[in-house]
Amino acid sequence: MSKPKVLVADPIAQKGIDELANGGSLDVTVKIGLKPDELLAIIGEFNALVVRSETKANAKVIEAATNLKVIGRAGVGVDNVDVDAATKRGIIVMNTPGGNTISTAEHAFSLMVSTARNIPQADASVKSGKWDRKTFVGVELYNKTLAILGMGRIGTEIARRAIAFGMRVLAYDPYLSASRARSLQVELVESLDLIIPQADFITLHMPLTAETKYMLNAERLAKTKKGVRIVNCARGGLIDEAALVEALKSKQVAAAALDVFEAEPLPAESPLRGLPNLILTPHLGASTAEAQEGVGIEVAEQIRAALLSGEIRNAVNMPSIDAKTLAVVGPHIALGEKLGHFLSQIAAKRVESLNINYSGKINEADTTPVTRSILASFLRAAGGPEVNVVNCLSFAENLGIKLTESRESSQSDFAELIELTATGENGWVSVAGTFFGTTPRIVKVNGRHVEAKPEGVLFLFENRDRPGVVGHVGTLLGKHKVNIAGMSLSRNEEGGEALTLLNLDSVPSEAIIKELTAGGDIHSVQVVQL
Ligand SMILES: NC(=O)c1ccc[n+]([C@@H]2O[C@H](COP(=O)([O-])OP(=O)(O)OC[C@H]3O[C@@H](n4cnc5c(N)ncnc54)[C@H](O)[C@@H]3O)[C@@H](O)[C@H]2O)c1
Ligand SMILES: O=C(O)CC[C@@H](O)C(=O)O
């Protein structure tokens, strides 16, 4: 079998590349600085793509990436990856969320100090031959009010440092709980319009989304304290650059520092380049030896785990499965896959809802990966091989299939049971499975107790409970050289309706099925292949 192929398209630490190549189980190609056309031409060969922020994994790239399984971002922001397009194609997108937190917080804090003390401007002045001590009089951080917009990992580290400098720290983050704010010793402020006028310094630490775009626009900048200082080390587009230029010119904003920009690289003609009270760095927040080594190794380990053992860590478009969870639910994921596939073959094409009932011991584990495995295999009948555990939820949503889960703490007949029920216009069908020791078994079909191995060819039919029917089936299949490997019968009452499930060694032909059903005792015949 050929090795999974990984393309590293942006510069990551050598230790990360070494980790990818470690043991020789991956085929690693490093090609930095590919032009969009060059990337499009080769991406189809690869199973994994590693990027920082330069390479754009846009919808076109993703469309051309016919073999791609995972995109690894060595860093936090995935705004250079079209995550929706990747999700639709079933590609896992992972980031390395914690690896550059300290470096970015230190950079943002350094920029804040620089806006207070004009350090870069003073440095440039001395180097130009001057000795000007009047122009660069600054302000202290001590006793000043800092507004942190976005109190996640980096915002939190900023708060710790600011408190150590004797600042009063306010935070605005609609997703931060009051108790977390208290434990961080910051004052949580309910709205942007309340926090902004109070601040001497403002620092931004949130992702760029439709909600956060131009969070600091002309109107908000006008509401700041005159002489406020602003730092953005998060994402360009959080601040309206044109409005900031005006506010810096009018001195409404005394000074600002930007590490990130609406367009990167910053265009040579950008008006931002000409402002004396604006400090610019070229997206350096994560550029330390420590952060790059950290995120490089982390992304490499994540890609190895995903490609070689199916362990998913830090995926932004699906829940993570760590090795410990995988060890517990791995067999259930495999059984769920079989049950979903079984159900898709006995259900009507148009299904309105799929319920998954977990009962007994399985409820002690995280069932999310089991649900995804069931749903993906159930939907593969409609969506083909491109439906997988990443895109199955959006696929179900597009088809209008409602997914529900239910739970029972104990199940009288089995220590644990996974039962799937698909409901459509014409009623419902169901299948349930469990383990006998470690061996998986189908133990219920359409609410009837049966017992069959979830593998190979399964032959399911309903019949009148009459003497000779089973013998007739055996004789007929034998005559056509179709061997019965296992048989299970379930009847509602003597002489009533029975449901029979057989494990067969080969697929019975249409002609055999016609012959079987000719007498009228056998009906609703279904062949399921797992
Ligand atoms: N300059 C760099 O090199 C660099 C390096 C690392 C991270 N970053 C960027 O910094 C930002 C923060 O990173 P992080 O690791 O702290 O992320 P994080 O996910 O830990 O924190 C983001 C915080 O923003 C909050 N938030 C979301 N929407 C908000 C809104 N509308 N208003 C206020 N708060 C909101 C979230 O609740 C969360 O607490 C990201 O945009 C990331 O891409 C930049
Ligand atoms: O790769 C980088 O240097 C930038 C990283 C940063 O923007 C991030 O979001 O993690």
Image (cartoon, rainbow, N blue to C red):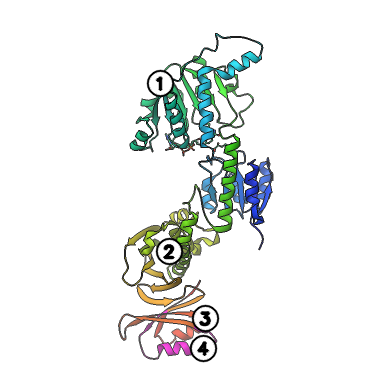
- Residue 409 falls left or right of residue 307: left
Residue on which disc 3 sits:
508
Please tell me which of labels 2 and 1 falls first in the chain: 1
Please tell me which of labels 2 and 3 falls first in the chain: 2
Residue on which disc 4 sits:
478
Residue on which disc 1 sits:
223
Expressed as whole percent of the image width and height from the top left, the position of residue 214 reads: 47, 30
Q: SS at mark 4? A: helix
Looking at the rendered image, the disc whose residue lies closer to the viewer, 2 or 3, is: 3
Q: Magenta span covers which residues?
A: 461-484
Splitting the image into 4 quarters, where does residue 465 fall? Answer: bottom left
Query: How far is the residue under mark 3 from the one under mark 4?
Result: 11 Å
- Residue lying at 33% horizontally and 37% vertically, measured from the top left: 179
Eyeballing the image, is 45 above or below 435?
Answer: above
Eyeballing the image, is 71 above or below 196?
Answer: below
In the picture, the quarter occupied by the N terminus is bottom right
